[in-house]
Each structure stands twice: as C-alpha cells, then as structure tokens.
Image (cartoon, helix red, strand yellow):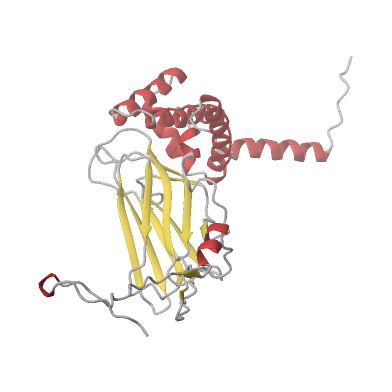
C-alpha cells in the first residue's frame, strides 16, 4: 500500500523558511541575564527598599545596603547577576523603557499602600505643572541609566527657551539617583549650562555620590538679572577608572527642571496728608486694587484734635511782692 503524498504549496514553504530564519537570527538572552519579568519584579522591590532606607534617620547608607541585599535574597539572585542584567537591558532602549514603565507604575501603587508616599506629598515641587510663575518645564525622559562604558557613560539633554522665559529667571534641576551596587568609585558628575542673550554662559556642577536626592540650582547674579536665557544644556557623566572596581550603574529618575520667575515689585499708592488749621488727617497706605477693611476705613477718617490753651492769670501772685491789689474793671 503506497502512502498518499501531502500537497505542499509554495506559500507554506516560504512561510516556514521565514520562520526558521527569524528564529535563527533573533538574539537570544545570554545565559545569566534575568528575564524581563524577573527584572521588573526585582527592580520594583529594589526601589521600594531605597524608599524604606530614606526613612531611616540613623546610618541610612548601612540601612540601604541591608535592604538591597534582602531584595537579592528574596528573589534568589546574586548582586553580580543583577549588575549584568542592568548593563544588558540598559543597552536596549526599547526593552528597558518597557521594563521601567511597568516598574514605576507598580512602585507608585505599592508605595501608596505602604505609606511611603508621605515624603513626596511634603515636597512642594512634586505637583508642579508647566504653567505659572513656578513651573516644571522638564520635557525629557523620566529616567536614565548611566554605565561606565565608552558608549553609555553619559546622559545629556538640551532645552531651547520659549516665550515663557523671562529676564531674571531662576532654575533648579532635581532628580533622584541610585547606584546599583557598592563600589569605592561610585561617583558621577552633573553639570548645567545656561546660555544668555549676550553670549554669556553660566554653569553649575555637583558631584553625585550616595545621596538619593540631588539638586543643581542657578540664581542669576546682578549682572545676569536683566538678561533672558536662550537655552539650557546639562549632562550626568559616570567616568571610567583604571581599576578593577569600576563604578556601578547609576539609575537617574524623577527628573524635574523648575523655572521660577522673578517676583514683581509691589506698587504702593503714596501716602497723602491733608493739612488744615483745626484738624489733622491720618491716612492708611493702600495697595493698588486692594479693598480696605472696616477698621482701616475707620482709621482713615479725619480725626479732630482739640488744642488746650491755658490763659495767663492777669493778677499773678508774687510772694516777694505781697498780695496784689484787685483791679476794678470799668
């Protein structure tokens, strides 16, 4: 009995060939690298551990290390495996963005349940919008990962000024940082440059070590107070060292660029005084457009002041002269 051959069309063969080529060429995750789901779970607990360490008043660095080691123990991974996975995913922007979006969503939800959001609620800049005299004008990404390699050792941004910028504006660049692991060389450099109308450049920089909260502030001096910023550039640089103990990857998150307009001087109506022979008028200083209170209205009314005059006695008594004689009036 002969077997009946199964018809094999050309389109099926082409689809099978394409699937084979795709599977053969698609990059597989290297051995020892955490899966995206596992990496997400670890990063969620990692961020929560950092938040818990910030609430410790005594020896926060030791508490931070203790909490992070507890995260690695919980997920049964080594610190080296976590470091390698961070390096792997940070070099793949699309995958890393997807992972971190899920991490931030879950961290915010769990922090609210654990009561760790209280510190953020006390932050006066946490709820700023892009409008107003004090505004958050940050347009870049919310997070970045800087690694001590030739291609990933720097994060930079450039911002052009718009019509909302004014002369005398002040700026604060705020962000959180976390070194993924401990190293003697965990040190990065942050820099901000401000380019003004007359080609003047002002700069501010800072060293980033183990402090989770960082701010770079720029308040223009008297020479720059009348000028407007044209553009702002900034970067965070993690230098490589000639040492086996390289800096650990640096996570940068919750970036904000706060712009503050210079306060306008308050216009005050000058004080006036009415002068007359019999009365003195007291006036109350009043700001333009401000409505006086009933007490101020009452105090601003003219007040008559009585003048007491003492008449001279026409017959004064002088002991040395004796009692004067009374003068009869005709």
Q: Is residue 105 left or right of residue 275?
A: right
> In the figure, residue 2 lies in which quadrant?
top right
> Is residue 35 visible to us here?
no
Q: Is residue 231 left or right of residue 99?
A: left
Q: Residue at x 41, y 34 (%)?
A: 84
Nearer to me, 280 or 136 = 280
> Is residue 323 visible to us here?
yes
Q: Is residue 222 left or right of residue 26?
A: left
Q: Is residue 92 left or right of residue 179?
A: right
Number of marks: 0
Residue 125 sits above or below residue 15 on the image = below
Q: Residue at x 28, y 28 (%)?
A: 59
Q: Quadrant of the C terminus?
A: bottom left
Residue 51 sits above or below residue 214 on the image = above
**Going by the picture, which residue comes out furthest to the top?**
1
Q: Residue at x 52, y 57 (%)?
A: 135
Give the image location of residue 217, x and y in percent: 37, 57
Nearer to me, 327 or 95 = 327
Nearer to me, 46 or 221 = 221
**Going by the picture, which residue comes out furthest to the left?**
320
Residue 66 sits above or below residue 8 on the image = above
């Amino acid at each position: 009995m002969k077997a009946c051959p199964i018809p094999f069309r050309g389109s099926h063969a082409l689809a099978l060939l394409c699937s084979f080529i795709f599977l053969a060429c698609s990059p597989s995750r290297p051995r020892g690298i955490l899966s995206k789901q596992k990496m997400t779970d670890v990063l969620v607990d990692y961020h929560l551990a950092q938040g818990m360490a910030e609430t410790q008043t005594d020896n926060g660095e030791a508490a931070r290390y203790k909490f992070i080691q507890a995260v690695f123990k919980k997920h049964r991974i080594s610190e080296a495996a976590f470091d390698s996975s961070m390096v792997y995913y940070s070099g793949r922007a699309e995958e890393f963005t997807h992972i971190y979006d899920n991490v931030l969503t879950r961290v915010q939800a769990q922090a609210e349940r654990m009561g760790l959001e209280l510190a953020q609620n006390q932050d006066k800049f946490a709820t700023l919008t892009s409008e107003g005299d004090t505004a958050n004008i940050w347009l870049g990404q919310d997070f970045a990962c800087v690694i001590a390699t030739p291609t990933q050792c720097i994060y930079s941004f450039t911002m052009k000024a718009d019509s909302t910028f004014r002369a005398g504006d002040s700026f604060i660049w705020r962000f959180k940082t976390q070194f993924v692991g401990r190293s003697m060389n965990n040190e990065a450099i942050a820099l901000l440059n401000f380019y003004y109308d007359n080609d003047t450049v002002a700069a501010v920089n800072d060293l980033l070590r183990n402090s989770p909260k960082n701010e770079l502030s720029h308040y223009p001096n008297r020479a720059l107070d009348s000028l407007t910023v044209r553009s702002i550039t900034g970067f965070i640089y993690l230098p490589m060292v000639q040492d086996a103990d390289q800096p650990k990857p640096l996570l940068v998150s919750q970036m904000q660029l706060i712009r503050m307009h210079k306060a306008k001087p308050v216009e005050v109506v000058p004080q006036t005084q009415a002068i007359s022979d019999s009365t003195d008028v007291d006036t109350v200083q009043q700001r333009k457009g401000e409505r006086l209170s009933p007490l101020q209205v009452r105090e601003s009314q003219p007040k008559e002041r009585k003048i007491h005059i003492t008449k001279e006695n026409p017959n004064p008594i002088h002991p040395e002269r004796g009692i004067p004689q009374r003068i009869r009036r005709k």
